[in-house]
Amino acid sequence: MKYQSFTNLDVGSKRYKAVGFDKISEQYDLERLPFCIKILLENLLRHEGEEFVRGEDIEQVAKWNTSEKIQHEISFVPARVILQDFTGVPAIVDLAAMRNAVNNLGGDAQSINPLNPVELVIDHSVMVDYFAEENALTKNTDIEIERNRERYQFLKWGQSSFDNFKVVPPGRGIVHQVNLEYLARCAFVKEEGDDLLVYPDTLVGTDSHTTMINGLGVLGWGVGGIEAEAAMLGQPVTMLLPEVVGFRLSGKLSPGITATDMVLTITEQLRNHGVVGKFVEFYGPGMKYLTTADRATIANMAPEYGATCGIFPLDSVALDYLTLTGRSDEQIALVEAYAKSAGLWHDANSKDAEYHESLDLDLSDVVPSLAGPKRPQDRIALDKAAAAFTAWHQLQVDTTDAKGEARFVSEGGDMAEVDEEHNSFVDFRGSKFNLQDGAIVIAAITSCTNTSNPSVLIGAGLVAKKAVELGLVSKPWVKTSLAPGSQVVTQYLEDAGLMEPLEKLGFNLVGYGCTTCIGNSGPLPDAVSKAIRDANLTVTSVLSGNRNFEGRIHPDVAANYLASPPLVVAYALAGNMKVDITKEPLAKNKDGKPVYLKDIWPTNEEIQSLINQFVSGDLFKQKYADIFKGNDVWRNLEVSTASVYDWPESTYIKQPPFFEKMKKEPSALTAIENARCLVKVGDSITTDHISPAGAIAPDSPAGQYLQEHGIEPPHFNSYGSRRGNHEVMMRGTFANVRLKNQLAPGTTGSATTHYPSGDRMSIFHAAMRYKKDGVSAVVIGGKEYGTGSSRDWAAKGPSLLGVKAVIAESYERIHRSNLIGMGILPLQFKPGENADSLGIQGDERFSVSVVGRGQKDVQVTVTTDDGETRHFMADVRIDTANEFTYFEHGGILHYVIRDYLQKAS
């Protein structure tokens, strides 16, 4: 039976065509469907008749059986794709390389173009080199351009060479905030012949926090760069019909409680419940008290609570936000009319949907919170934070070498007598002090999570204003920074008179983009860094971000805490995590009297009054009027005019080897025989551990490569900025300073043992030695392997190192998909089994039988060097038919190239 039908929708002077639900609703009660599932149903109906959509798919979605788990594969075609530059550069490098491959195989290279709109926002390249000074923004921007000129030239070439591809130049904002404030359509319009087809705005993005847009009723989530490239090229995203967890919000936040406190509470609750691979949909009477910015803060953290997405429906609150951010009256009217006609509108009369599971939270129960020291789901009530740090730190002391003694903090955070002979002594910017365990050396207002929300930013400005009026200053060892997600933020802070007090506390504008939250915190002052290392101190950071994984923020900082922007300011005043800022004074005022947090905390009324006065639609229209224009440096970049990239000599952009030996037909799948274990790790290994990120050490394989090519350490830039060069990236794979490879006990970072020689060496050099000897490699992991950011290099890097399979206890969704996208076989230990229970040491040889289409498990043979053999069964985590097709082609991009050539022949 064909279910597809269309209906006309008149809005203003225009007539639109939209998918109708009349036929399908005759058989199924669609009011039972969650908002997000209705969007998936519309997507399937719109593409009915195409080879990847069957009637059975539509029926499975429409009948919405929540009483049992249905393992049914469906396809999803996003309306658009969004990229940031760290993950976007390698995606465009791959598209350029695909043009070379198609050209070499006799096809039309220019046929390789995005078929769906692609927007890339350059936001991940600015670093906090300069801070707490008037010209920090200008200096950091100049350094950013100098470091990244070759990357920017390449992206500008891509913008002129590829159809459907736009680039937002550097210095304009963070991708997710730009998406929320400007790029999102909510109702997407496409010309089809003489018709204007309207349908839900949906997307996938190459950043985990693409989910932030769910707060505006737009369905989308993060995928690996590999999967995003396929979506650009017209391939559907294949997925199992998701379970949907309903999260009912009731009540209202108490006075003084921030959206950040709320989202950390929700993150903890959902992560504890377990929502990995599931959709989360928010509903309930409490929603009406949450602005779109509040909702986006919750949706942003979906990767942290483990869900594929965390979505809110379209309602009057969404329309208010579209108005606030300067969207056109025509677009707002279309969004409302389409949502209501398609049954995608939510109001007080809407029935609650049916969910697989339901949770609830009374917002009045939320208390001031932060999260840390290593995971965003580890929420701590603010009044327990100091004690929690002290207990955690004592545990570190008990399990590691004794810490160096330090003396500087007396009660209330005041500087005490200075001991210049102690190795913790610091002389910096005219201040002399002894650094101590718990010292907050980074306090950063940063990240898409919170800088999209005027309530917490105005709140931070008011905290600063009240603190300055009382004569308080940030502690001299704290590296303070303000890196908002859009230029709108600094404008309303300036207009409200709040930038000046923030600057007086050192929160000068350092750039518009992702900084501290992704590890672009820049260097600590040399004197501070030296004291940390010489005295073996455990120091901390506080940031308004979404990620605080081990080793992510700064290599010298062991404990990292997520907090609201107002609390970031407060902690900069206190200076140490050992200070209980709910009970102890932050510092003393100019009269020597103690000042407490309550003395400088603003009221909700104060915050809302300034929002009403200074945050307006005209402001958004003004700041986004020339969003794609860029500054003079961007506009004057010289770029190639060739349609097939000519790959100039560069240490930033290099043609990848993925398609070098590619043929028109894929080779038959083969068994993995006598592979060696390259890396063996425990639980919660993130893509930060696997994929290169942050600074490049001069003595690392990547650092040595750059020096061999004439690049001196001051000009290394970061791993993220060099993701367009596979030579750098493969050398940095598994090189995170916090990685503990069990094959090299007592070490961290890129170290392993080569077998059978027993030689200790870097992971890169061991991999190259195995490849030279014709030996394949495997990786063995624990639970939640590949959590964190959706980095395609966490799969590309191992592929180039010769890894043929990963065997782990469980996977994060995106990383498992990326492994398949690079032709790596993801295997999973059977429930209750792991490397330890099976006696796997990692020095054995591993063989895996050929995997066939639809095969659920496979035998793994483990052979020791003295000839002992044993076997175990592992689950094959190729979950869908499309995934197997990509796997048998050696990767998703290989399949796309062959599909292009076949259709063109």
Image (cartoon, helix red, strand yellow):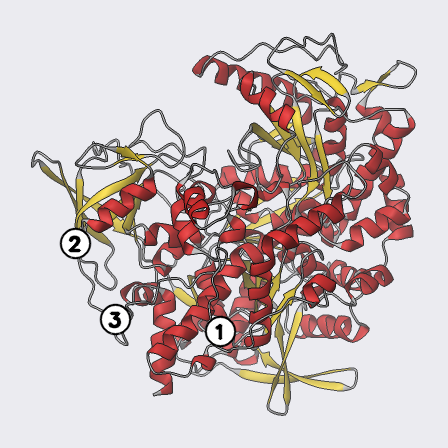
Residue 363 in view of the camera: yes
How far is the residue under mark 1 from the one under mark 3?
A: 30 Å
Specify the quadrant of the image occupied by residue 401.
top left
| Label 1 crowd bin: few (<14), some (14–19), many (20+), radius 10 Å | many
Q: Nearer the viewer, residue 269 or 583?
A: 583
Q: Earlier in the sequence, mark 2 or mark 3?
A: 3
Asked whether the beta carbons under mark 1 and mark 3 sit within 8 Å of each other, the answer is no
User: Which residue is drawn at the image coordinates 56% and 60% (left, top)?
Assistant: 150
| Label 3 crowd bin: few (<14), some (14–19), many (20+), radius 10 Å | few
User: Which residue is drawn at the image coordinates 58% and 84% (left, top)?
Assistant: 6
Q: Where is residue 748 drawn, in percent x and y?
A: 40, 30
How far is the residue under mark 1 from the one under mark 2?
A: 36 Å
User: Circle 2 sits in a helix, a strand or a loop, which is it?
Assistant: loop
Q: Nearer the viewer, residue 630 or 569?
A: 630
Amino acid type, label 1 = Leu
Whether 406 is drawn above or below 453: the answer is above
Whether 154 is drawn above or below 514: the answer is below
Q: Where is residue 173 drawn, in percent x and y?
A: 70, 55
Q: Is residue 363 left or right of residue 769?
A: right
Amino acid type, label 2 = Ser
The residue at the far bottom in this view is 194
| Label 2 crowd bin: few (<14), some (14–19), many (20+), radius 10 Å | few
Specify the quadrant of the image occupied by residue 566.
top right
Residue beneath label 1, please?
44
Residue 899 in view of the camera: no
Q: Nearer the viewer, residue 692 or 270?
A: 692
User: Circle 1 sits in a helix, a strand or a loop, which is it?
Assistant: helix
Residue beneath label 3, please?
666
Residue beneath label 2, please?
849
Q: Is residue 683 left or right of residue 303?
A: left
